[in-house]
Image (tube, rainbow, N blue to C red):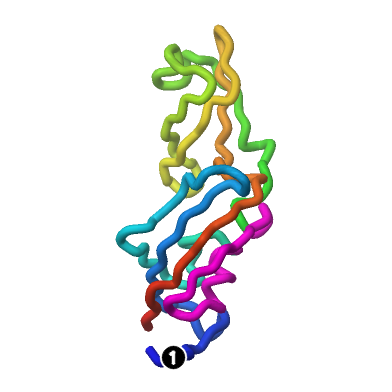
Amino acid sequence: MGAKEETGRDARYGKHAKIRYQGGIFGEDSSDFRLDEPLEIIMGYGYVCPGLQEALYDMQVGEKRIVIIKPDKGFGDVDPDGIQTYPRVMVPGGADMEVGSVIGRKNEVTGQVIPVRVIKADKDYLTMDYNHPFAGKTLQYEVELVDIED
């Protein structure tokens, strides 16, 4: 590509981009990263959160940028309906689970398996959080746009 490639949503939507990144919850150590082999995404298709996508629309190839992402442009607010309580006997492996345990559960709408965290546990019940671990959090990412192609 030339020294100055076209930027903006209209110019980049649907193009293949390669990125490296590291980040996570603002003020905490990075917990989400891809620093070696670049991750290939299709611009605008939801591969990354909206706040990160918006930054990539306006970056030049080779540029690195630190991006602060509020919850509404990240993984949204915590959805109270995403917190559910079940009898331990109804959860596979429930007898051995404790606060902090994570299991994969099938999302009934999308069919995808998602990580679900146990946030409360007592003798008979488990309270499980289906929200993304970054929901309701401000995020900070350092991102590099390695390449972009049609």
Left or right: 39, with 135 as reference point: left
Answer with the quarter of the image where residue 133 lies: top right
The answer to which of 39 and 140 lies nearer the viewer is 140
Image: 29 above or below 95: below
Q: Residue 43: horizontal and vertical position, in percent?
A: 47, 72
Question: Could you tell me which quadrant the C terminus lies in?
Answer: bottom left
Residue at 43 percent of width and 79 percent of height: 61
Q: Residue 38: horizontal and vertical position, in percent?
A: 34, 64
Answer with the quarter of the image where residue 146 lies: bottom left
Q: Secondary structure at mark 1?
A: loop
The answer to which of 128 and 56 lies nearer the viewer is 56
Q: Residue 33: horizontal and vertical position, in percent?
A: 43, 52
The answer to which of 107 and 28 lies nearer the viewer is 28
Question: Could you tell me which quadrant the N terminus lies in?
Answer: bottom left
Residue at 57 percent of width and 70 percent of height: 55
Residue at 61 percent of width and 55 percent of height: 74
The residue under label 1 is 3
Magenta residues, start to end: 51-73
Q: Residue 112: horizontal and vertical position, in percent?
A: 42, 46
Image: 69 above or below 110: below
Q: Residue furthest top?
A: 123
- Was residue 58 drawn as part of the magenta stretch in this picture? yes
Mark 1 residue type: Ala
- Was residue 31 drawn as part of the magenta stretch in this picture? no
Residue at 46 percent of width and 29 percent of height: 102
